[in-house]
Amino acid sequence: ETSAPKNMSEDMNRKATIVMEHIIQASDVAHSMQHWRIYCKWNEKLFEERYRSFLSGQEEEDPSDRWFENEIGFFDNYVIPLA
């Protein structure tokens, strides 16, 4: 029967996808779990990247408008639930 190998392949793909999603989530929040200086360094780089994107027209929202509120929301809704 050909459905068993297909199911095994689908199962492996699903598991690989879940692992990759977790790796991406961990890398997304890793800077926030480091020393304060490292957090500030990467946060500043992220802000600069997003601000340059805004100035060039690639991003619609000026990140400086709500940067601090968004950071608090990021912790409350994303980082802390993963901890």
Image (cartoon, rainbow, N blue to C red):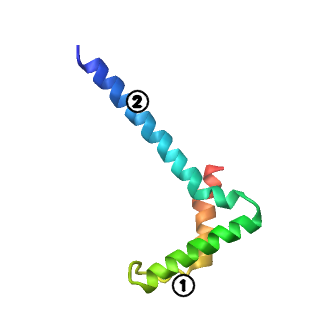
Secondary structure of the residue carrying numbered label 1: loop
> At x 48% / y 44%, what residue is drawn?
20
| Quadrant of the image occupied by residue 46 | bottom right
Residue 64 found in image quarter: bottom right
Label 1 amino acid?
A: Asp
**Compared with residue 57, is residue 14 higher up or lower down, i.e. above or below?**
above
Q: x and y percent of residue 31 in the render?
A: 65, 60
Q: Label 1 neighbourhood size at 10 Å, few (<14), some (14-19), many (20+)?
A: few
Q: What element carries label 2?
A: helix
Write down the residue under mark 1: 65
Residue 73, above or below 3: below
> Going 62% across and 77% down the picture, which residue do you hit?
68
7 relative position to 74: left or right: left
Image: 18 above or below 72: above
What percent of the width, then of the height, locates residue 83?
66, 50
Structural distance between the alpha carbons of marks 1 and 2: 43 Å
Query: What residue lies at 62% left-to-right and 62% top-to-bottom?
Result: 76
Q: Residue 12 carries which label?
A: 2
